[in-house]
Every structure is written in C-alpha cells, then in structure tokens.
Image (spheres, grey):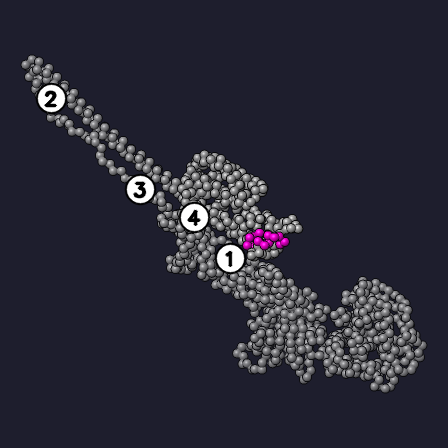
Amino acid sequence: MEEEAREEPELPRSTAPKDFLFYHMDLYESEDRLPIFPEENTRMGREVAQAEMTTEPRAAAKCRVPGNILEEEDAIARLYGLEDDHELGEEFAGENAHGKDLSEFPPCVMRRREAAREQRDWRVGGEVAEAEDLSFGGWGSTDQCQNLREAYRYTRGRSSEEYECYVIPEEEDEEDAPTVFCVTCKTPVRACEKDLEEHQEHQVTPLEKALESAKDEVHKNMFKLEKQIIEMENFASHLEEVFITVEENFGRQEQNFESHYNEILETLAQKYERKIQVLGEKKREKLEALYGQLVSCGENLETCKELMETIEELCHEEKVDFIKDAVIMADRLGKFLKTKTDVDLSAQPDFEDQTLDFSDVEQLMDSINTIPVPSAPVINPQAPNSATGSSVRVCWSLYSDDTVESYQLAYRPVQDNSPREDQAEFTLTAKETYCSVTNLAPNTQYEFWVTARNRAGTSPASECAVYMTAPSPPIIKTMAIRSCEEAALISWDSGNLNPVDSYTVELTQAETPEASGVTESVVGIPTCEALIQLQPRQTYTLYVRALNVGGPSARSKPATIHTTGSYFHLNKDTCHPWLTISEDGFTVIRSERKTTAREPLPRCVAVRGNLIPVRGRHYWEVEVDERLDYTVGVAFEGIPKQEDLGTDRRSWCMRHTFASSRHKYEFLHNKMTPDIRITISPRRIGVLLDYENSKLSFFNVDISQHLYTFNCQLHHFVHPWFSLGKSGSLKIHNGISMPKHVAFY
Amino acid sequence: MALKQISSNKCFGGFQKVFEHDSVELSCKMRFGIYLPPKAETAKCPALYWLSGLSCTEQNFISKAGYHAAASEHGLVVVAPDTSPRGCNIKGEDESWDFGSGAGFYVDATEDPWKTNYRMYSYVTQELPQLINANFPVDPQLMSIFGHSMGGHGALICALKNPGKYKSVSAFSPICNPVLCPWGKKAFSGYLGSDQSKWKAYDATHLVTSYPGSQLDILIDQGKDDQFLSDGQLLPDNFIAACTEKKVPVVFRLQEGYDHSYYFIATFITDHIRHHAKYLNA
C-alpha cells in the first residue's frame, strides 16, 4: 500500500503551474525572508492607511482559515489513505497557525497584496479580478494556495524523512505470506493458494522480484522528485529576485507619479491664486471708477440745486437787486453750464472675456507618464588594480531619482603635446553604471566622461576622469640572468615607452607542483633590476609585472633559475676584439688571424664574466686544452684592460704557459707567483671564490686535486676573467654544484 | 701486545698520548705518539700516520709540528711512531745520526746484523696499523700517511708499494730518490746490501715508474732554502719528472725562504692535514 501512496502525489504535481503558487506563500510567510523588504516598513503614510483598511478582509480570512485546514487535512488524509497519521495533520495545523500569526503583522499585508498581484499572471481567470482588487480580494485565494502548499510540504517532507517507509515491513513475512506477485492484478498472491488459479492467465513474478522492481521504481521517482525540488527552489529564488526588482521599479514609479501629481496640483493652485488676484484687482478698479463718477455726479447735483435755489430767491427780490444779482447769477450760471457734465459710464459692469491658459498644466499632465531628463552622472576615479594592459573598467553613479535607460561613455587618449580637440573621440553605450573599455593601448592615460539618457533626453556630461591602462608586461633579459646558491640578479626591459610606477617579481618554486601558483612576490621594485634571495639547489620560475595606477601588467614570459652553483654569462662588452664568444655564450675562441688594429688594442686578450654581486661562495669550471696558453682568475670591477691579469693588486689568476713541451703554472697576484709544479696538466680547472674566507682556490677537477689557494682581501666584488694567450678555446661551465672535495678549501 | 701509556695530555679537546709496547717485528719496546681528537670519543675516526725524519723520536712531531688544531677540527687520529728500533744492542747502532738508531729508513733490512730488528717497513705498514686498529677507535678502511725528510721518503714508498692501502699521501722535503743521494746510499747499502737492484724497491722515484695508476693525490712541500735540497739529498725533481711521465698527480710547492726544520713543517702542516682530511673524510 505504501508504494501506491507514494505514487499518488504525482497526480497533483502534474499540474505544474500550481506548484509555483506555493512558493509565493512560502516566500511571504517564512520569517527569515522578511528582511528582503525592509523598505516596506518605511513606506509613506498612504500605504499604511491602506494597510489599515485591510483589517476587515483579513479578519474574514482568518475566520475562514481554520475551516479550510480541517477540510484540507481530511482531504489529504483520504487521498493518501493515512487517516491514522495524526502527526501529519498536526504539522499542517501548526503551519497554518504560524501563517495566522504572521497575517496579523501589518506590513505583511501589503506584501500579500503584492503577491496577489504577481500571482495573477498564472491565476485561473475568475480570480484575476479579485487579485487586482485593491481591497485585497486576492487573499481569498488562500484555499488554493494552502492546499497546494500542503501538498508540497507533504511530498517534500516525505522525500527527506521517510525513506525507510519504502522498505516493506518484515513482519509480513509470515508462514502464509504471499510469495508471488500478480502483475496484472497488482496484488500479492500466495503461491500455495487456490487463488493462484485465478491468476493463471496473468503475468506472475516472484514477490521478491516484484519488490525489487517496485523499489527501483520508487527510488527513480524519488530521484525525479528531488531533481524537481531543486529546480523549483532555483525557480523560487529567481522569482524572489524578480520580485525585488518589481518592488523597486514600481516603488520608483510611484514616487515619480506622486511628485508629478504634486507638481501639477501646485501649478494649478498657483494658477488659481493668480487668476483670483487678477479678478479682484479688476473688480476693485471698476468699483473705484464707478464710485468716483457717483461722487462727482452728486456734486453736480448739489451745485444745480443750489443754483436753482439761488435763482428762485432772486426772482423774489427787488428789481434793482434782481438786475444786479441776475447779472452775477447769469455769469455764474453761464460758467456752470459751460462745465460739461459727464454722464458716460466710466466702467462697464460686465466681465471682459478672460481666456484661461491651461497649456502648462496640460504639459505637466502629459509629462506624468514621461520621466525627467536625468542629471549628469558622477564619474568615479579609477579603482586601483582595475585595469589591464588593454582595458579599463570605468564606473560612475547616477542620482538615485533619475531613471536612466542607457549611458554614453566617451573617451580619448590624453596626450600632453597635442590639444584635446585633436584627439579622436570614441563613444560606447552601456546599460549599467560601469563599462569595460577594451582595445586600449597599454600604460596610457585616457579621459572618460559619461552622459545618461532616457526617453526624455540626454543629461549633461559628467566631469572628465582620467583612467590609465596597466602597462605592458616587461621582458626579462634572459641573457643577463646571474645567480648563485642564495640569490639571483635579474634584469628586464620595461616593455613600455612611458615610465611605470614599479615592478613586481613573482617567483614559484618549480620543485613543488602541489604548491602551484605564486609562492613569493617582491614588490615595489623601482628599477629594471632586482636581486632576489632564494633557497639553494632549487629551481624557480620567475615572472615580472610592471605596475602603474591602473594596476599590474600581465606576467612577463617566465625565466627559469636554478640555484645550483653560480651562474653567469660572459660580458660581450668586455670581450677583446681577438676573441669571439660562441652562440651558447660559454665558449671563448681566439682564432689565428692578424688584425690590423687602427687603435691600440688592450694587451690582455680577455673577456669578463658577470658574476652576481653576492658575498658567499662561487664556483665555476673552465675546460682547457693542455697545450693552450690561458689565464683564468678574478679581478675587481673596473680593472683597466691594458693590464695583464695578475700584474697588480686588483687581480688574482692562474696562468698556464706551454713552451718547449713544458707546462708552466703560475698563480699570479701583483706579478708574484709561488713556485709550484704540477705533474698532471688539468683539462678542467675548478675555481672557487670564497668571499667569506677571503680565498680563491684552483682545482684540477678530473682528479679532485687542489692546486693552489690565494688568501685575498676581497673588499669589493670581483668578476671572473678568462684570457687566451694563443689561438684556441676555453669552455666555461657554471651553474654546477660545487664538488664535495672543494669544500675543504 | 700490551699497551703501556706513558703520557696523556689534553689538547684541543682531545688527547695527545704516548704509548709503549713490545714490537714483534722489531723485537724491542717501541713508543708511539697518538692524538685522539674529540670526535674519537663517540665515533671511529680515520687514522693518519706520520713518519718522522732522521734522528727523530716519536716526540719531535707531537711537540713541534702544531698539527693538533687541524687534526682536532677534521677528526683525525694521528699516529707518530719512532723512527727506528731502540736499544737492540747492535754494534754501531748509535754511531752515526744517519744510520742505525733514529735512521731506520722504513725498510725491512736484509743484511746482518740489522735484519732481525730493523724491519721498520713491516712495522709501520703492518704491525702498527693492526695495533692501532685493535686498540683505538679508528676506521681500519681509512688511513693515510705523511712524513718529513726520511719520513717523507717512508710515506711515499709505503703509499706507492701498497696501492689503495692509503687514501692519500703527502710529504715535507722528502728524500725522493734515495738510491742517488748520499743518505740513501749509506742506509740502503747497510740495510739491504750492495745489490742496488734491491734498493729500487724502496725508492719512491723508481716505485712511481711501476705504480699501477691507482688514484693517489700527492702533496709535497719543499723549503727553497733547505740545505739538504742544495746538497742533493732530497732530489725532488727526479720524482716530479717520474710522476709527470707516469701521470701520477703531484702538487709540488717550492716554498720560498723555508728550510728543513719543524718551523717549516709547522707552517704548512694545516695544508697537509686538510689534504688528507679531504680524502679521509670524503
């Protein structure tokens, strides 16, 4: 029965979209995800008011939930035939209780609203209206969501906790237990039973085998489910991201709308104020005019009345007086009548037609749906180590209120000698607030500026920022590498025309492949040369990087250094014109040719080796011909080449001359030599330079014979010298470990 | 072969001792000096044998050469035997300084009355090494030999007559070609008889010509102001010529201003000790 129960959950799961619904609920109800929406809590009052409005529906939802749970439990229990599994039911109840707790948490309500909105895309049609309803009718879909969520919880819970249930309980293994499985009827059958006859026509397999295949099937399904769970979880986290983005975008748009509406309202209010003021002024003006007219009218009337009265009085007077007064009166009257009485209305009572201009408001209204032109972005200074030899990563920022669709990044190389305008200008379009600009020249300064644009237009340009590409990798002079057991002196070409800030030497020990990668770095080297301390008898791979403000260059090509013995190259600059150095750099050849020298040539036909300037022990060997006239030794730096080796206090050497079949060996310093006879002519001479003990020793390498040791005060560094008195060749061997017998001297 | 300790003095962390024993080869009591370096307390050390010159006893070298510091540093046991049998009551044994007592010449005498006691060659190559190996912490595989004047001759012939027995050899002012010098002629005729062909078996210059060529690094120091050099007693040129001819490696250093004395030996003893240490401690 267990197997069948396991297969059942496949049925609801096959309606794939519904499964997603669960995730949203999960998202909103799990407490640990709350901090994803911190801005919710700081939202404007308007939304809080909305939140308060939801109290009622929420209460309704609360009432509904418990009923749902009970129904659900029953349904699920029936579905899986797990009536007795109270634990499961309790778990559901517990979860729902948890859900309820959360639903009393005001900020959550808004989230649910959002969720409801989001869900509408894959809601069944009838619920869309509800979901969109701002009164949070979307919450009404709780039933469905919870239903699915629980279904999911159930399957998921099982997949992780109840593996052991797939094993058929052993207790069924009784005497008359079924031993055969009828595939057709899908029921176990006892082999001995008469019932077997029923299944005669059916496909029958041993119970064990059936069990195995059933288990396989179960495991396969489990695997599928687990895979699906992972996919779902990924999808859920993706949704979360989308959710946050939507949050942000809409929040921004809301703010935008609000500011626009406020702006419009303000503009309208201003307009109203202005109009009212204009009207008031006009009214006052008119009334004042009319009043003035009225007053003057009254005055006239007064005067007329007075005149009438005076004339009436006059009529009652004596003739003499009448005549006398009548003349005066006639003058007065005449004068009065001459003054014109204005009876035209100075102000019209009606209202002059005033057109109301709402064009600006209309413009504002129009612009509600558009967005403001962004302000100039702020370009960031170059971040350290952000550049490569051919690219820089330019970053800038925008004002948070701006909506920007794209940025235009422009740049041109900075050159001191030519004016800015002459330089070609390049532009790039970027969606983000950064851009990696490639295909640039190394170790070069570029100035960058950026503009932001959206539908409404393009912002002013930002300030210019100068970015610098990283340098080109240096080139190690492999032919100039010198080393000894304790150190290496390496030099390199900058690889850049302009100066760089510094160099870094990276070294890895080749002997330890497990410690791959950089084991050591020497940083801040100001010149193109570095003396690196190393461990004896190891192999190192060295790289050099050049650095400037933009960052480090790529690695140079590697150089390999073996700290076995001392390693040096012959210095071609010191090479006498009669000598040539072989291609490998270690064989000195003097050939039999007469050169007609225009200028006096140095007497000493010699070449110098560039020994590393490190105090310690240095050993090298020279392969010679027994009949060759040669001189090998050391000399202080800057010895005049006019002098033969060993003729002054600045050099020490072993000189061999071969004349009339006799070998002569001299150990020369300051023109003096001990009287030493050697019975076997060395073919390979070992030279040990020991700064610590102030000694220079010579050996016959082939027979480990010590020939001579100078005690010499080496206050300065010396270099090996090799001289040929006759035509022939010397071969120098270095980078070899010091033979053991040499250690006794 | 009971050893009797005559003296013991601490020196450079080790001990300079003198022992006496009854020699079977020489049929007399013999003394030898032995320096045991500090290293000998914990490990077996190589043994370096010093053969002294005419008229010397075991005392000259151990008291005058100043080798102890170098031997202590390199961990070498240095054995210095006497130069001849003593007190054998042979007629004329003490008559001259260059024959008899103190002048054994490191040969096995074949002539009467010397042949019973004067078997210094066998003593220094056989009996003494066995005694040392048995009684002191030395590695029997690692031995070298050196000496002065007559001892230089002794060291050279011991090495040349026993290829491989000694890891290295060196000498101060050795008598290189005794068959041709007055000392050698006197001694060899006395000990070996008048048949000069027998002498060649104890002559370094002759031995070189038949040396089989086993690797042997020879270091020789010679004072330029050595009267015996100018007297023709030492004849190093003959030996060098033979070695050059036979390609036997020699570094011969003619030291300006030095004579035949132990002052000369003391000056260069460190070089010689190092020369042997190079092969014994390799």
Region rendered in magenta: A181-198
- Mark 4 residue type: Leu
- Image quarter hosting the C terminus of chain B: bottom right
What residue would you read off at disc 4?
A398
Q: Residues within 10 Å of mark 3 (few under 14, many from 20)?
A: few
The structure residue drawn at horizontal position 50% and vertical position 45%, both measured from the top left corner, is A148
Question: Callout 4: few (<14), some (14-19), or many (20+) C-alpha neighbours within 10 Å?
Answer: some
Subunit ID for the residue under disc 2: A
Residue A236 appears at what percent x and percent y? 50, 48
Kindly identify the amino acid type of the residue bearing the numbered disc 1: Gly
Discs 4 and 3 lie in a common subunit: yes
Circle 2 or circle 4, nearest the eye: 4
Check if residue A195 falls in the magenta segment.
yes
Front in this rendered view, residue A184 or A53: A184
Secondary element under disc 2, as helix, strand or loop, is: helix
Q: Which residue is mark 3?
A: A362
Q: Which mark is residue B110?
A: none
- Measure the C-alpha gap from mark 1 to mark 3: 54 Å
